[in-house]
Image (spheres, helix red, strand yellow):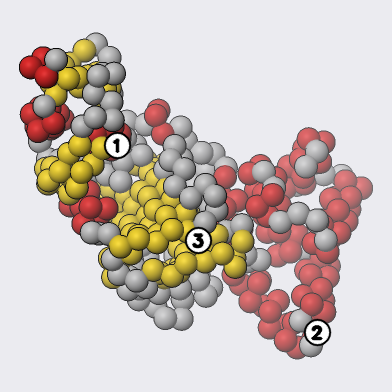
């Protein structure tokens, strides 16, 4: 979208356009609905937000344009009365909840490294920083928040059709969240979840960046979708883990119980179905690879420990770096040469954890000005 057009749309949304400018924007939008030549995923985040704003203002508030949209939907459905039903549904739930979710998520992203505490973003103007490992609950008609410090907050729950919230969990923190439908979510360090305050329409949809474990409340008529980078994880009611960090190429979904359908967001015919004990990996070649795994290895983090089997030391330290928000480096002499197996309790301080790892892998841990360094033990030289 051209910068001049963006400025004009912003002016329109603020109600500051002249009559001539207003007609120009509405005519452009009317043509755009017929054939914009672009899918929503091809718009940049700013343009998606402007398009969504126009939909709200024009389609819902302007009777003339609203009627044009009505007849366009009716024609697409061929039968006019069926088109009317479709239109009423769109008026109530929006053109596409997924598009609105992606549009909302694309605006105002927070740099993870700048956060010290978990942040709950209620809207563009309101946010709450939560001390420690926080708990949030939407199931009682109000937003209940428990800080890691033990204090509780109760906020009025915004339930408008476009009411989304974002939970950002920085490195070194974890959070638990109960969504309005009763679905429980455990968010790992360095993760972000965008979700509606209340689920409306015939889908339950959230967007994940990072890692989370989901225990989805069963609702056969309203499937649950987790959008993680390039993958759509669709479930009805089940327990599974999704790992989709921005600095990792693979997107990993591990199913504990129930059934999950994985779909490539860029090609909905590219799918894979998981059964309990499966892990589906979406690779950078845009293909799904399914393997049988011990699910405890991929879900134990939410219970405060890591269950490891021949875990490469460098990968283990990457996990601990996120979990504790500390810098851990490997000396050149130890890279790719050490593996770790067993249950690693994450409750102690990181210094104790690193000494346990050093002892088990025959390395030694040293504290430096820049953080921690693991290197080959002197008796191995």
Q: Position of residue 358 (x, y in %)?
A: 12, 27
Q: Is residue 22 left or right of residue 99?
A: right
Query: Residue at left 30%, top 62%?
Result: 292
The mark found on residue 232 in the picture is 3
Q: Nearer the viewer, residue 292 or 70?
A: 292
Question: How packed is label 2: few (under 14 Cα within 10 Å), some, or many (20 or more)?
Answer: few
Q: Secondary structure at mark 1?
A: helix
- Vertical arrangement, residue 340 with respect to residue 250, above or below: above
Q: Residue at x 69, y 49 (%)?
A: 42
Q: Is residue 101 above or below residue 236?
A: above
Q: Earlier in the sequence, mark 2 or mark 1?
A: 2
Q: Position of residue 73 (x, y in %)?
A: 77, 75
- Residue 367 lies, in percent from the top left, at 17, 16
| Real-space CA distance between mark 2 and mark 1, rounded to the nearest whole angstrom | 56 Å
Quadrant of the rendered structure where residue 195 is?
A: bottom left
| Mark 2 or 3, nearer chain start | 2
Q: Vertically, is 38 above or below 128?
A: below
The residue carrying mark 2 is 78
Q: Is residue 144 left or right of residue 220?
A: left
Disc 2 to disc 3, C-alpha distance: 30 Å
Q: Quadrant of residue 18?
A: top right
Q: Residue furthest toward the front?
A: 381
Q: Quadrant of the C terminus?
A: top left
Marks 1/3: CA–CA distance = 26 Å
Q: Earlier in the sequence, mark 1 or mark 3?
A: 3
- Which numbered dot is residue 315? 1
Between circles 1 and 3, the one closer to the viewer is 1
Element at label 2: loop
Classify 80 as above or below 192. Answer: below
């Amino acid at each position: 979208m051209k910068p001049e057009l963006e400025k004009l749309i912003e002016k329109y949304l603020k109600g500051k356009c002249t009559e001539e400018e207003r007609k120009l924007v509405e005519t452009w939008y009317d043509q755009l609905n017929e054939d914009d030549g672009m899918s929503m995923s091809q718009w940049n985040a700013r343009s998606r937000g402007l398009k969504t704003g126009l939909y709200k203002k024009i389609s819902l508030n302007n009777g003339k344009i609203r009627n044009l949209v009505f007849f366009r939907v009716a024609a697409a459905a061929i039968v006019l009365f069926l088109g009317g039903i479709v239109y009423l549904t769109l008026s109530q739930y929006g053109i596409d909840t997924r598009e609105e979710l992606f549009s909302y998520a694309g605006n105002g992203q927070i740099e993870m490294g700048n956060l010290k505490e978990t942040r709950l973003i209620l809207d563009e103007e309101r946010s709450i920083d939560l001390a420690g490992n926080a708990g949030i609950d939407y199931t009682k008609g109000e937003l209940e928040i428990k800080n890691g410090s033990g204090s509780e907050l109760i906020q009025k729950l915004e339930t408008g059709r476009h009411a989304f919230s974002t939970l950002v969990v920085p490195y070194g923190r974890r959070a638990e969240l109960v969504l309005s439908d009763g679905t429980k979510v455990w968010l790992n360090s360095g993760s972000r979840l965008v979700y509606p305050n209340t689920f409306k329409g015939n889908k339950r949809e959230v967007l994940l960046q990072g890692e989370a474990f989901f225990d989805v409340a069963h609702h056969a008529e309203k499937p649950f979708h987790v959008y993680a980078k390039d993958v759509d994880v669709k479930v009805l009611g089940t327990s599974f883990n999704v790992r989709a960090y921005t600095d990792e190429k693979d997107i990993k979904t591990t199913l504990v119980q129930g059934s999950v359908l994985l779909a490539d967001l860029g090609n909905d015919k590219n799918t894979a179905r998981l059964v309990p004990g499966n892990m589906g990996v979406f690779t950078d070649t845009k293909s799904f690879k399914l393997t049988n795994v011990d699910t405890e290895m991929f879900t134990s983090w939410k219970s405060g420990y890591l269950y490891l089997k021949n875990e490469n030391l460098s990968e283990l330290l990457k996990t601990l770096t996120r979990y504790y928000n500390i810098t851990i480096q490997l000396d050149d002499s130890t890279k790719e040469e050490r593996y770790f197996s067993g249950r690693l309790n994450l409750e102690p301080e990181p210094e104790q954890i690193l000494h346990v790892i050093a002892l088990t892998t025959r390395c030694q841990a040293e504290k430096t000005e820049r953080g921690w360094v693991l290197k080959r033990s002197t008796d191995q030289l």
